[in-house]
Amino acid sequence: MHKKYVFDPYPLQTTMQRLAENLKTRRLEKKLSTKSLAEMSGVPASSIQRFELKHSISLESYVKLAKALGYSEEIMQLLAEPKYDTMEELLEINKNRTRKRGV
């Protein structure tokens, strides 16, 4: 199978910024301070502040924050379904569903 290059219009920094903005919006909607969210999630308040300002966080901390805000199901659905652009790609995905290792 040939490698396919998909144009991604979002640079990494843009994606991280959007994730941070979304988290902050959800936090503020629930009227939570960074300290309160830190207590609920087990993620230090300084890490939450750094994420909201500099858009940097570990995956583990991000998942803890999302779960504390009630987004467990959304986190579990991330990458749960295959993405494809053509019927041939879908057929190849379905053919490889039982694979346990890469090439």
Image (cartoon, rainbow, N blue to C red):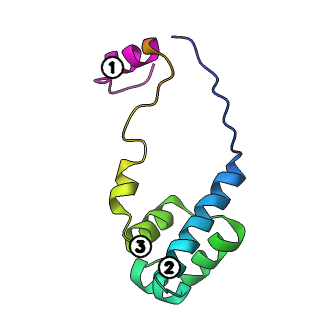
Pointer 3 with pointer 1, Cβ within 8 A: no
Q: The residue tagged with tag 2: helix, strand or loop?
A: helix
Separation of residues labelled 1 and 2 (CA atoms): 41 Å
Write down the quadrant of residue 58 in the picture: bottom right
Residue under pointer 1:
94
Q: Answer above or below: position of 49 versus 23.
A: below
Mark 3, other Cα within 10 Å: few <14 / some 14–19 / many ≥20: some
Is 21 situated above or below 42? above
Q: Is residue 42 magenta?
A: no
Q: Viewer-nearest of labels 1 and 2? A: 2
Q: Amino acid at mark 2?
A: Glu
Say if 17 sits above or below 50 in the image: above
Between residues 12 and 60, which one lies in front from this camera angle?
12
Residue ID for mark 2? 29
In 3D space, how far apart are the residues under numbered discs 3 and 2 (Cα atoms)?
10 Å
Q: Residue at x 46, y 81 (%)?
A: 30
Question: In this figure, which residue is indicated by the disc labeled 3?
Answer: 69
List x then y, in percent, for residue 42: 43, 79
Task: Give SS at disc 1.
Answer: helix
Please give the range of residues in magenta: 88-103
Labels 3 & 2 near each other (Cβ < 8 A)? no
Crowding near the residue tagged with mark 2, few <14, some 14–19, many ≥20 C-alpha atoms within 10 Å: few
Residue lying at 50% horizontally and 79% vertically, measured from the top left: 29
Give the residue displayed 51% in from the left and 22% down from the top: 85
Element assignment for label 3: loop
Q: Position of residue 59 (x, y in %)?
A: 51, 59
